[in-house]
Image (tube, rainbow, N blue to C red):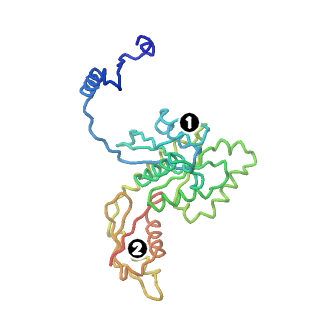
Amino acid sequence: MPDFYSLGFDKIFPVSALHGLGFGDLLTAIAEDIESEPEKQDEFADFKVVLLGKPNVGKSSLMNLLIKQERSIISPIAGTTRESISERISFEKGTIEITDTPGIRRRGRIDDDLEEIMVKNSFSSVRDADVIIFIVDSSEGTLCNQELNLLFYAYEQKKSILIVFNKLDLLNCNEDCYLKDRLKYNLEQYSFILKKIPQVWISCKNEQGVEKVMKEISKISKRLQKTLDAIEVDEFVKDRLIKNPIYKKNELLEVYNIKPIPARIPTFVVKVSDPVHFEESHLNYIENILREKYDFLECPINLIIRG
């Protein structure tokens, strides 16, 4: 036993699992520690932010910079983060919970049960989040199919999204700006969704632009909590639909009333003439009218159609 004390522990408990020896002292020490712990009240974060992306794009580095401590392990080896890691920090008048998720590879490259669990854990974190910070390695010059799938998944889950293009230091090293121009060119084909999502360019290595991430999170939280005047919303939308009505097979689709209701994301109840004939394109049109009037950048909009 003296050899074990050289490890520096104050308390050491020799036990025998086979014969059940020594567990009385161990259980007594555990009970004393439990009794000395102050009772903790359950705390719930006001806002949940999840870092999402492929392996090795800088999620753990950004996590550490945002919470200002070495919470996540940083390594050039892809797949170092094996489970979601969360940390709460003070934010404006409340708290936010930031979660670093394992990098998600395309399904064909998931080759063990542990990684399958990691992927499910990441998707669960996305569903539970308020905001998704989608991190991209900008030095690759493009978005791969896996990144697009993850982005569309977060969008379909109606999450507020912020795209962070990391490794700006590698782009700045490229004097002809080829990689940056190539990335911007490749992004143009996805403008139909990216125009609704803000982008921030940073370098975790040089800590360049990282402060912009927290500023964008602040903007998102304010937009999500925005209170709208119900009468103003109703009059504005119906006025636009009078000028530019919507049809389904020459049948006029009327909106009788649109009303904002309290929810975690901007949500509107839309009373219409014929709910069955209202398609996704019609909902997108009404959504664009709302976005034109109100600053809903980064925010998803939920429309509930009723007859």
Regarding mark 2 in the picture, which secondary structure is present there? helix
Q: Secondary structure at mark 1?
A: loop
Instruction: Say above or below: 221 vs 69.
Output: below
Percent position of residue 240, x then y? 44, 76
Q: Nearer the viewer, residue 226 or 207?
A: 207
Q: Quadrant of the C terminus?
A: bottom left
Q: Residue at x 54, y 42 (%)?
A: 210
The residue identified by callout 2 is 237
Q: How many marks?
A: 2
Q: Position of residue 182 (x, y in %)?
A: 70, 55
Asked if residue 148 is positioned above or below residue 63 in the image, the reply reads below
Identify residue type, mark 1.
Ile
Relative vertical location of residue 217 with respect to residue 234 in this rendering, above or below: above
For disc 1, the marked residue is 74
Against 30, is 58 above or below? below
Instruction: Decide which of tag 2 and tag 1 comes sooner along the chain.
Output: 1
- The amino acid pointed to by label 2 is Val
